[in-house]
Image: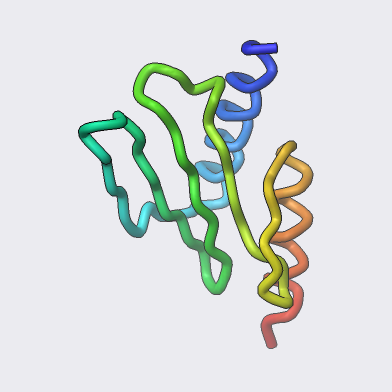
Amino acid sequence: MNNIGGTLHSRVHNWIDAIGFRLNASQTNDKSHVTTNHYFFETFNFFEKKRRDHPESTKFLCFDAYGEKINVKSLLDLQVAFFENISQLK
């Protein structure tokens, strides 16, 4: 199961690099070794929360076009939210 989480982490990062997401902010809690990264592209934002040296336990969070929280369990979840958000730009 750890391999699946690591694969999600690498797939998400490959995709965000291809699209051109930018890292807006990064905060690290030195006590718990948890880093929270905030990425954005146009009007779409999402967050990545990861423990140092444990990419398999990385969690992603984004919001749909209505502001509802979406826990990302696959790259497809993130892509659907992203393209829905971008398609509503005029």
**Rendered residue at 26%/40% (across/down):** 29
Occupied quadrant, residue 12: top right
Residue reaching furthest to the left: 30
Occupied quadrant, residue 86: bottom right
Viewport quadrant of the C terminus: bottom right
**Rendered residue at 35%/59% (across/down):** 24
Q: Position of residue 21 (x, y in %)?
A: 48, 54
Q: Position of residue 40 (x, y in %)?
A: 48, 61
- Horizontal arrangement in the rendering, residue 62 relative to residue 51 (left or right): right
In the rendered view, would you say 38 is above or below 72?
below
Q: Position of residue 48 (x, y in %)?
A: 49, 44
**Rendered residue at 39%/47% (across/down):** 37
Instruction: Indicate the colouring scheme.
Output: rainbow
Name the residue nearer the viewer: 61 or 39.
61
Residue reaching furthest to the bottom: 90
- Horizontal arrangement in the rendering, residue 80 relative to residue 50 (left or right): right
Name the residue nearer the viewer: 32 or 63.
32
Viewport quadrant of the N terminus: top right
Occupied quadrant, residue 32: top left
Q: Position of residue 76 (x, y in %)?
A: 78, 43
- Horizontal arrangement in the rendering, residue 74 relative to residue 18 (left or right): right
In the rendered view, would you say 26 is above or below 66?
above
Count of marks overlaid on the render? 0
